[in-house]
Amino acid sequence: MTADLGPHAAFIVTAYGAAIAIVAGLILWVLLDRRYLSRALDELEAQGITRRSERTNEEKP
Amino acid sequence: MPVLDLANPTRFLALTDRALPWLAAATLLAFALGANQVYLAPDDYQQGATVKIMYIHVPAAWLGLFAWTLMSAAALGTLVWRHPLADAAAKAAAPIGTAFTLMCLVTGSLWGRPMWGTYWVWDARLTSVLVLFLMYLGVMALWRTVDDPARAARGAAVLTLVGAINIPIIKFSVDWWSTLHQPASVLRLGGSTIHPAILLPLIVMIIAFTLLFLTLHLAAMRNEIMRRRVRTMLMMRADARP
């Protein structure tokens, strides 16, 4: 069973296609940004750099 | 957990880690239900099947306005309490609001061509939404222009509050001026003018899109907090070097 979209089917399909592309772009942006930032944090922590709030009592001056 | 605890970025991150999978699942479920409703919805007696564009156009328009309203509330948090979480909320909402406003403009144009005979008219509703889109771009450009996140946040907050004047203009433009765009038909005094067979799928899609917005916004806020941590650690590394 397929929906009959009538004489303006091309406009309807293009509108849904554009909406899906925009939402996919947003999801991709959030996921790739998260991956980049996680890697950057891991690399900095591997270099021994920690924020003040994450230091143990022995590390604090 | 007291509400104020959420204002602590570390606790906020822990909360979002737990909430995001549930929100994402709820979003998927709502979209599955919405897609089914849209598929089964009858054609409009005037618009025909073109009414199906409204199921994405109306939620996109609502979220374009909602994101700026949320940014305005966050702007108050930035300017009054100078809270970093308010900065993150505003900065994370801007690209998402931009995307939904763009979706509103594109789908509206694609509906307008077969229904009005034109992709675009310079009427008050369309023009004020275009202004909203340009303001989103302006705020994002400001965030990128200023290096210090706290200073950028204050500048963006002022610009956001000034731009908030446009939100009621968009909402009431169809009442204040003679526009080609139809007047309010969902949220209006005296109830909706839409037939329930079309209104129900529209409401389900509005809920689905709103859940999507909340999911993306929480995820983007989490990224924003992580970005600040990376920046702080990079500065500490630079300071530690001889």
Image: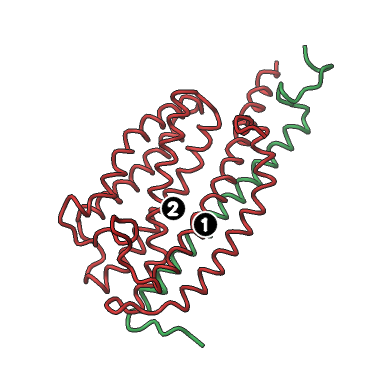
Chain colours: A green, B red
Q: Is residue B221 left or right of residue B99?
A: right
Q: Chain of mark 2?
A: B
Q: Is residue A16 above or below residue B48?
A: above
x and y percent of residue B109 in the render?
A: 30, 64
Classify mark 2: helix, strand or loop: helix
Q: Foreground residue, A54 or A4?
A: A4
**Amino acid type of the residue that numbered disc 2 sits on in the rendered structure:** Ala
Quadrant where the N terminus of chain B lies? top right
Marks 1/2: CA–CA distance: 9 Å
Q: Is residue B181 left or right of residue B101?
A: left
Q: How dense is the environment of label 2, judged by Cα within 10 Å: few (below 14), some, or many (20 and up)?
A: many
Pointer 1 with pointer 2, Cβ within 8 A: yes
The residue under label 2 is B99
Q: Is residue B112 left or right of residue B157?
A: left
**Picture quarter containing residue B178?**
bottom left
x and y percent of residue B237 in the render?
A: 69, 24
Q: Foreground residue, B32 or A55?
A: B32
Q: Is residue B214 above or below residue B81?
A: below
The residue under label 1 is A25
Q: Chain of mark 1?
A: A
Residue located at (49% from left, 73% from top): B37
**Picture quarter containing residue B30?**
bottom right
Q: How dense is the environment of label 1, judged by Cα within 10 Å: few (below 14), some, or many (20 and up)?
A: few
